[in-house]
Each structure stands twice: as structure tokens, then as C-alpha cells.
Image: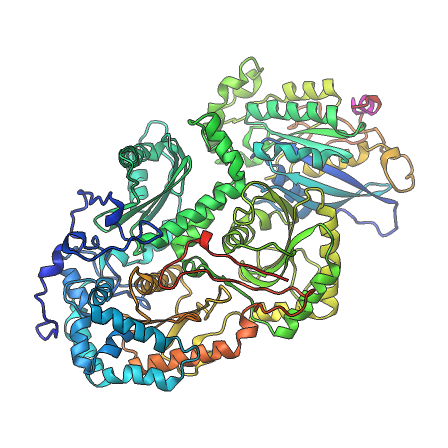
């Protein structure tokens, strides 16, 4: 379980409630499964209701125990969402980089969180299924073909969105440009990552970034050395360039700290 | 075949048997012509005009134990006639009314008719039904001793076994198995996806071919004709068929005459209409109308479980053309796993009963007490379930648990991978339509890690049969953490008092083999349903029925036995059926239903003896095999299951109440 707890010296430990939201079939459960069990299942069946999982995340100065609510994305479960995000300190709003409508849905979730969730909730916008794009270098494989049919249907919804750079390469199933999502994230003061639960790219980084972004004050246990707080970077560059996010970088996340969203 | 002891010419009844060419649909629109039409069972007098419609072909020659080498499926016009000769529908009816075995044999083996037909036909004679009453008195002796059974069968031994042997050796072996239920090895492909048609429609033919090759289809459509769900293929593929079905259904609907079933060749179509929905089952297995109807009703319950009845009604009252696919999104796998369990053959569905894990009564009591001790106020139902077998249940006063609901829960928890694959604890809003179809309850599910090498996370190595789940249901959607706390305390207590070990051992031990119960028995498998408890027990699938196709063949045999013995207006209490590859035996009393299967050449005497030994064993082990009611105290949790099945009729889930009272 505790793959990320490596040190022996006891560090202050605190728990963080985290909720995953997003359209159905964007890969929420797969992200959690990758983070918790470092595992991936093809064609995972849709989550029913919600699943509760825990995983520890070790920071240099403290250990964060994530209590994760992995919710089902289907609309009929939407009315239950407040129950899960009500006391959450962090939220992962996930969309599918090959499906523009899923970003629209993600924006709705962000708005709802900003309106309804506890003030100070740390929100990360995560574009999943990076392996289906050319940015997901090594694992492109057969996957783009299967995603094409699905995305084609949603093509019109992408109208007006900036796709030029991604569409150049053939076999790229990407339909949501990184820039579009990242600039939105920046506006709203969200952490932003593009991930692949299949290959594991950026998955742990998302959770680590969240752990770092949680304000010290909202953690239950004693204070750590104060590092990390508010120092999370947004993955503002192309994910292909920085598959590992440098946590010590500059970033709008600091700005977000002040914003009572 | 010349030596057939039967009277009438073999050709005569062939008209009744389904020889209809596949293209010609044999419609039986009027309810009075359809056997399983109305639960009230209109008393159909057997005038020639109103003879029962052609019954489906019966699997008189199932190759139960032979996986490969199925004979070619060439349609043989003379097949039914020949097949029937292998069948000996034995019932106490005959035995009680006949002195000489030979004469009764003549009655039984009506040539050219199918087996069930034969058993139905004794009832048309006054003598038959009179004898049936006698028989029912005789067989209602709950613990029928072996001697009695021996007497019952004694008459036949001299005359019968010789005849049967003679037949199977001379006549039947030359003829191909009956094609309709000749479940070959390609059965495994039944569950494979048909694929999708490419954009240019290039693969359409292949996909359609695959789709048509499926032996079992389920379609759900709205009354307006919108496809909602189908087990095989997608909306585009099936839309034309859905259109045809809808046209046929509404044709009869318009004339205020509900279409319930029809058949085309060896394919049976059964339709259930539920409010704004039509559910259609298309089967090339030998399943009775009633059995298929039960399956469709379970699928409907699954839809209610996802949506609740008021919201389903509301959706369609607002807009009759509602596309229900969207609200049901994500629950398709639940429908599919449920459908597949029917296609594979499901004893709980066939018997409308549930299975319990066999443990000592005192052990169960300990678990009960632990469950009670750790119980929290928001808990409505608490269940411990091992691979679909109930270990324990706790419930509040004045609330019952419906077997149909349990079937849905077990399907969700054990069959659909979604819950287990999540790897954590689940919190699932679920409507239990048998309990209350108008609202949601909230279900906490967590799996126990029972493996010795604790420490590593539960992985895929635990199979469905082995996984043990704690299921806790509450009406309060906020009570997750409360139930989680209860679960932790409960499991800790179980660990302390050794109950976890007991559950694990019982799970590891599995179901007993027939030879464990009766050494050297001829029986390969049995099902025993305790009617009073609405629970059943059965022997291990291994070693004879461990593959999917063998298991399917076994279940077809059981389906058949069950259908014959529960056929309307029959008074059959004992039914013995011999085919080329197996002999099967059913025995129904007000206390129990017993079904078993043995090899083809099993001696009937041995079969009957084994059967009663197993029944004896079940009675001896009753308190371990079943969760028995009988109020123990006002606090303890007792299970009392009331079977309101009317004898000789297969009940519908909705008629069946599983009452647990304190």
C-alpha cells in the first residue's frame, strides 16, 4: 500500500480528503488505481456509486494520507457529488484529452466546486489519456484508432477550439490542446497536469503537487517545516517536455493560495 | 426401433412438433394458446382445438459429459419421433396407477411426442390426475425412506432397464443429438462481443453473422420503439430487428391482445411488457416461457434498481420518446452480467432461491452475535456473503429481504467486476425494487482479504467464488463512515473469535462432491431446494461440470426437469428422464425440490437410492446448509423465509417473499 512512504523517521502525518470528479469514462478510477496500486486495467468497468480508497504520499517534511473518493461520472450520480466534495480539501477534476466535451464537463465541475465546496479547496485540472496523443510518446500504439470514433462524434463541440498544433501529426487522437486547458486552469487558479494512467506519466506528480498545495493551516496535524506550501508549479509547458513536474518551480498556484475559491 | 413398445404410429404426432421452417414464424398471439401466459392459469380444457401449442424441442439427448465430438447438426425430420423414445417420463402417477411396469411404459412413452408432452398427457385422463393426488400424498412424506423409493421403482427394474438399454444401444446412438440444445464447444464464444461495424460498413456481414450465431439474445426497447439495451451488438446493428419486434408487439397491443411468446423453428421469443418498456428474450436453448419470463423480470428489476420506478415512470410520462440509454449509462454491464449468468445457467434463478455457505450452526450464531454487537443505528441490512453464498444476515424488524433484490446485489457485488476492481470500499446508491421500488438505499461494500499471507493488497488471484464481501445497507446516504467504522469493528471481532478462519475454511472447502456425500454414487450432480427456507444447496461443479459448456448442458437438463415437473396442470412428483448421455431425476414434495443427474446408463434403483441418501444427508445437515428461521429470541436475528410458491407452478420473483423476522 504505502509505496511512497520510504523514510523511517516519523514525520508529521495528516490526512487529506480528496475527491475525483469528471465525465464518465475519462479515467478517474484508472488514475486512482495507478496512484494507489500502481496498476492499470484495460477496459475497466464503470464505477458504480463511489469508491473510497486511501494512499499515503510522502513529502520531504511530512506524510500526507489521502482519503480518496473516486466518484462515478454518470449523470445520474451527479446529485450525490456534494456529499463527496463537501468536506474535501482537494479535488481532481479529470477530462479526456481526446474528448473536448469532457473538458466542458470539467469546467462545470470546477465552477460547482468553486461555488459549493469548502473555500480553499485545492483543485487540480487533469487531462488524462495522454498515451493516446503524440505527446504520450512511447505508448501511442494501437490506441488512437479506437479513440477516433468516439471523438469524431464530439467533433462539433470542439468548434472554435484551438487545435492546430496537435492535428498536424497523423494518428494523434488529441482533441484538446494543452494550451487551451492550461490557460483555463491558469485563469481559474487550478493546478494543471496532463497524465496517462496507462503509462503512469505524471500520475504521482498530480497527487504530490496537491499534497504540496494544501495550505498548512488546513492540515490537522502539527506544522511541518513549512516547505512545499504554495510552491506547486502548474505544468504550463507541453507535457511532453516536462513529464516530471518540478515541484519547486514558480507557479500560479501561489496566486491560487490567496484566492478563496 | 421396430421394437418400440408404444402403441400409436410414430408419425401421427409429428405435426405438433416444431417442424416449422425457420422462415415461417409460428405466432401464438392469443393468450389462451400460450402455455405460460397468465399467472392465474386459465383452466384450459383439453379439447383438440385448444391443444397446447408445440412445445419446444426437449433435450432428451444431452451430451452432458462429453465435451467434444458433438455430432453434426443436420436437421432430421424424423428426429423428434426418434428422440422421444429414449425418454421415459417416470412419475408416481404412472406407478401408482399401473400394476404392470410394461403397461405403464406404454403410457409413458407416447411415441413422437416430446417428453414434457408425454407427462402432460397423462393428466388429461381422469385416471392420471386421480393418481396424481395419490402420488402427492405419498411423496409428501417429508423424509421418504429408502424403502419407499425402492418400491416405487421396483416395478420397473425387471422390465424397464432392459428396454432402455436395448433402445439406447440399438436405436438412439445412430441419431444425432437434438440440435436445439446441442451446446457445442463454441458456447464459449457466446459471450464474446460481436464487434462493431466499420464506418463504411465493410464488416457488416461478418458482424451480423456473429450476432446471429448467438444462441441467446436479450433486447430491451421502449414502447415507442427506441432500443434501450441489448446484450449483443449495438443500437445500430439491432435497430432493424428492434423495429420488427416493436411492430409485432404493437400489432397485438392494438387489438388489446398482449403478445407473450412465439417461436420460429427452434427459437423461442418471449416478451414481457412493463410499463413503458418491452423486454424481449430470444433463446435457442431449451428454456420454458416461464423461465425466460423470470429472466426478463430480473432484468427489469435491474433497471428499476438503477433508476427507481418513479423516475422511470416520470421519464416516460414527460416524454414518451425518452432515450433511456443515457440515464442507464454505466449500468449496462450489470444488465449484461445478469443476462450472462442466465445464459450460463443459474441455479438461483432457476430455483428462485438462494444459496448459503455451509458452516456449523454455532459458528453462524457467533457471527450473528458479533454482527449484532457491532451494529450501528443507521444499519438497515447487514450481510456477509461468500462468493454469492450468504453467510449471515441482519435486518431490522418488519422489513423483509426479497430474493430478487439479493440476486441483484450479488450480481453487482460478485459478477460485475466494477465494485471489486475498484480495490477499495464502495458506496453505492441502489434501489431494491422488492424492498421498495420508489427510492434509493445506500450500500457499503468491502471485500475481506482472507488469504494467509496478509499484507499484500487483495489482487486478482481471489476468484469470485472465494471472495468474501461485507455488505451493509443503510437508508442514510451520509452514513458511509459510520458503516465503515462498524465494518472495522465487526471484522476485528470476527478475527478475534476465529470466525474469519471458519469462513475461510468453509470457502476453501467448497461445495461437496456427490461422491463425498454418498461414496460411489452414480450421481454426478444435484440441486436441492428447501421450499420452506427458499434456499438451495448443490454439489460441486467439479469434476464433471467445470467447463462452461458442460455446465450449460447440465443446467439445460435441470431447466428441462424443472419445466416438466412444474408444468401447469401436471401433478408429477417424480420425473425420471433417460437420454443417450445422461439420466436425470426430479422429485418434488411440499418440503423440497430435488434434481439430480447421473450417467446415461445409471441403474434407476441406484439413482433413487443415491437420491434419497442425499436427501437424508441434507436433512441431517439442514442447519448448516441453510439459514433456518424459527424465532430463537426476540433479539437474535432469525431468518424465516416464506415460500409462497404455489405448488407445481414456477413462481415469479414478485410472488416470492423472503421474510426474515425477529
Answer above or below: position of B97 versus B47: below
User: Magenta region's main secondary structure?
Assistant: helix
Q: Is residue B257 above or below residue A250?
A: below
Residue B322 image position (x, y, % from top left): 45, 28
The C terminus of chain A: image quadrant: top right
Where residue B425 appears, x then y in whole percent?
Answer: 66, 49
From the viewer's perspective, tell me whether residue A5 is left or right of residue B9: right
Q: Can residue B576 be seen in this view?
A: no
The colour scheme of the drawn protein is rainbow
Magenta highlight on residue A256: yes
Q: Is residue A72 above or below residue B641?
A: above
Q: In which quarter of the image is residue B273?
A: top left
Q: Nearer the viewer, residue B230 or A166?
A: B230
Above or below: residue B373 compared with residue B429: below
* Of residues A143 and B319, the one drawn nearer to the viewer in this rendering: B319
The number of discs equals 0
- Residue B592, given in percent of the width and then of the height, sits at 43, 70
Q: Left or right: where does residue B367 sit relative to residue B620?
A: right
Q: Which residue is drawn at 59% across and 34% down?
A: A73
First to last magenta residue range: A251-257
Residue A148 pos. (x, y %) = 47, 28
Residue B3 is covered by the magenta coloring = no
Q: Which of B512 and B32 is in front in this view?
A: B32
- Asked which quadrant contains residue B394, the reply is bottom right
Q: Can residue B520 be seen in this view?
A: yes
Taking the image as shown, residue B231 lies to the left or right of residue B154, namely right
Amino acid at each position: 500500500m504505502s509505496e511512497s512512504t520510504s523514510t523511517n523517521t516519523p514525520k508529521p502525518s495528516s490526512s487529506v480528503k480528496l475527491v475525483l470528479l469528471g465525465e464518465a469514462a475519462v479515467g478517474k478510477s484508472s488514475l486512482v488505481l495507478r496512484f494507489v496500486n500502481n496498476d492499470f486495467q484495460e477496459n475497466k468497468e464503470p464505477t458504480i456509486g463511489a469508491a473510497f480508497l486511501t494512499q499515503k504520499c510522502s513529502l520531504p517534511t511530512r506524510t500526507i494520507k489521502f482519503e480518496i473518493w473516486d466518484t462515478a461520472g454518470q449523470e445520474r450520480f451527479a446529485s450525490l457529488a456534494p456529499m463527496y466534495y463537501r468536506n474535501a480539501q482537494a479535488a481532481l477534476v479529470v477530462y479526456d484529452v481526446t474528448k473536448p466535451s469532457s473538458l466542458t464537463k470539467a469546467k462545470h465541475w470546477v465552477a460547482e466546486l468553486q461555488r459549493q465546496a469548502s473555500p480553499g479547496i485545492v483543485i487540480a485540472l487533469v487531462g488524462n489519456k495522454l498515451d493516446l496523443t503524440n505527446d504520450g510518446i512511447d505508448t501511442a500504439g494501437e490506441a488512437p484508432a479506437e479513440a477516433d470514433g468516439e471523438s469524431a462524434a464530439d467533433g462539433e463541440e470542439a468548434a472554435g477550439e484551438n487545435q492546430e498544433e496537435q492535428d498536424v501529426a497523423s494518428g494523434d487522437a488529441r482533441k484538446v490542446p494543452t494550451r487551451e486547458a492550461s490557460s483555463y486552469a491558469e485563469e481559474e487558479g487550478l493546478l494543471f497536469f496532463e497524465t496517462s494512467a496507462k503509462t503512469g506519466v505524471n500520475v504521482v506528480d498530480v497527487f504530490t503537487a496537491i499534497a504540496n498545495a494544501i495550505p498548512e493551516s488546513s492540515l490537522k496535524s502539527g506544522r511541518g517545516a513549512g516547505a512545499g506550501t504554495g510552491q506547486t508549479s502548474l505544468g504550463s509547458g507541453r507535457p511532453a517536455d516536462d513529464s516530471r513536474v518540478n515541484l519547486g518551480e514558480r507557479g500560479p498556484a501561489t496566486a491560487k493560495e490567496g484566492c478563496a475559491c | 426401433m421396430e421394437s418400440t413398445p408404444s402403441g400409436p404410429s410414430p408419425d401421427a404426432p409429428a405435426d405438433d412438433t416444431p417442424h416449422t421452417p425457420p422462415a415461417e414464424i409460428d405466432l401464438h398471439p392469443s393468450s389462451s394458446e400460450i402455455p405460460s401466459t397468465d399467472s392465474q392459469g386459465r383452466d384450459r380444457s383439453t379439447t383438440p382445438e385448444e391443444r397446447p401449442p408445440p412445445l419446444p424441442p426437449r433435450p432428451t439427448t444431452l451430451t452432458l459429459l462429453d465435451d467434444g465430438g458433438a455430432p453434426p447438426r443436420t436437421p432430421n425430420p424424423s428426429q423428434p419421433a426418434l428422440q422421444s423414445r429414449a425418454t421415459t417420463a417416470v412419475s408416481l402417477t404412472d406407478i401408482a396407477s399401473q400394476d404392470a411396469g410394461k403397461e405403464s411404459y406404454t403410457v409413458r412413452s407416447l411415441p413422437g411426442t416430446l417428453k414434457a408432452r408425454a407427462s402432460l398427457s397423462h393428466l388429461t385422463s381422469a385416471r392420471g390426475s386421480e393418481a396424481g393426488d395419490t402420488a402427492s400424498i405419498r411423496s409428501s412424506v417429508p423424509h421418504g425412506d429408502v424403502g419407499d423409493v425402492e418400491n416405487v421403482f421396483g416395478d420397473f427394474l425387471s422390465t424397464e432397464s432392459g428396454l432402455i438399454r436395448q433402445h439406447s444401444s440399438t436405436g438412439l446412438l445412430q441419431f444425432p443429438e437434438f440440435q436445439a440444445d446441442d451446446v457445442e464447444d463454441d458456447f464459449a464464444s457466446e459471450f464474446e462481443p460481436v464487434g462493431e461495424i466499420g464506418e463504411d460498413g465493410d464488416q457488416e456481414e461478418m458482424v451480423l453473422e456473429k450476432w446471429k450465431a448467438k444462441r441467446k439474445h436479450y433486447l430491451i426497447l421502449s414502447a415507442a420503439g427506441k432500443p434501450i439495451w441489448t446484450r449483443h451488438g449495438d443500437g445500430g446493428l439491432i435497430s432493424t430487428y428492434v423495429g420488427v419486434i416493436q411492430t409485432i408487439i404493437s400489432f397485438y397491443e392494438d387489438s388489446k391482445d398482449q403478445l407473450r411468446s412465439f417461436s420460429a423453428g427452434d427459437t423461442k421469443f418471449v416478451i414481457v411488457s412493463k410499463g413503458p418498456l418491452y423486454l424481449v428474450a430470444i433463446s435457442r436453448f431449451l428454456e420454458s416461457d416461464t423461465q425466460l419470463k423470470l429472466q426478463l423480470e430480473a432484468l427489469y428489476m435491474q433497471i428499476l434498481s438503477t433508476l427507481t420506478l418513479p423516475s422511470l415512470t416520470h421519464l416516460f410520462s414527460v416524454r414518451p420518446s425518452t432515450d433511456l440509454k443515457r440515464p442507464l449509462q454505466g449500468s449496462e454491464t450489470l444488465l449484461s452480467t445478469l443476462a450472462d449468468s442466465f445464459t450460463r445457467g443459474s441455479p438461483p434463478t432457476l430455483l428462485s432461491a438462494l444459496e448459503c455457505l455451509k458452516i456449523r450452526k454455532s459458528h453462524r450464531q457467533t457471527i450473528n452475535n458479533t454482527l449484532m454487537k457491532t451494529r450501528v443505528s443507521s444499519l438497515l441490512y447487514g450481510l456477509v456473503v461468500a462468493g454469492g453464498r450468504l453467510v449471515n444476515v441482519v435486518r431490522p424488524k418488519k422489513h423483509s429481504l426479497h430474493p430478487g433484490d439479493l440476486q441483484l446485489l450479488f450480481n453487482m457485488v460478485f459478477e460485475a467486476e466494477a465494485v471489486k476492481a475498484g480495490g477499495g470500499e464502495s458506496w453505492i446508491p441502489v434501489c431494491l425494487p422488492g424492498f421498495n421500488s420508489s427510492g434509493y438505499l445506500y450500500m457499503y461494500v468491502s471485500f475481506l482479504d482472507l488469504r494467509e499471507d496478509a499484507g499484500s493488497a487483495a489482487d486478482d488471484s481471489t476468484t469470485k467464488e472465494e471472495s468474501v464481501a461485507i455488505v451493509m445497507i443503510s437508508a442514510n446516504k451520509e452514513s458511509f463512515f459510520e458503516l465503515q467504522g462498524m465494518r472495522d469493528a465487526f471484522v476485528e471481532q470476527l478475527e478475534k473469535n476465529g470466525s474469519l478462519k471458519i469462513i475461510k475454511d468453509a470457502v476453501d472447502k467448497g461445495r461437496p462432491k456427490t461422491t463425498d456425500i454418498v461414496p460411489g454414487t452414480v450421481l454426478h450432480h444435484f440441486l436441492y431446494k428447501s421450499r420452506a427456507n427458499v434456499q438451495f444447496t448443490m454439489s460441486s461443479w467439479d469434476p464433471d461440470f467445470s467447463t462452461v459448456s458442460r455446465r450449460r448442458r447440465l443446467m439445460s437438463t435441470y431447466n428441462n426437469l424443472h419445466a416438466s415437473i412444474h408444468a401447469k396442470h401436471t401433478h408429477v412428483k417424480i420425473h425420471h428422464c433417460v437420454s443417450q448421455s445422461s439420466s436425470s431425476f426430479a422429485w418434488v414434495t411440499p418440503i423440497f425440490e430435488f434434481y439430480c443427474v447421473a450417467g446415461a446408463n445409471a441403474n434407476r434403483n441406484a439413482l433413487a437410492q443415491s437420491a434419497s441418501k442425499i436427501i437424508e444427508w441434507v436433512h441431517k445437515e439442514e442447519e448448516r446448509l441453510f439459514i433456518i428461521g424459527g424465532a430463537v429470541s426476540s433479539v437474535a436475528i432469525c431468518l424465516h423465509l416464506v415460500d409462497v410458491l404455489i405448488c407445481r407452478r414456477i413462481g415469479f420473483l414478485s410472488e416470492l417473499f423472503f421474510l426474515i423476522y425477529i
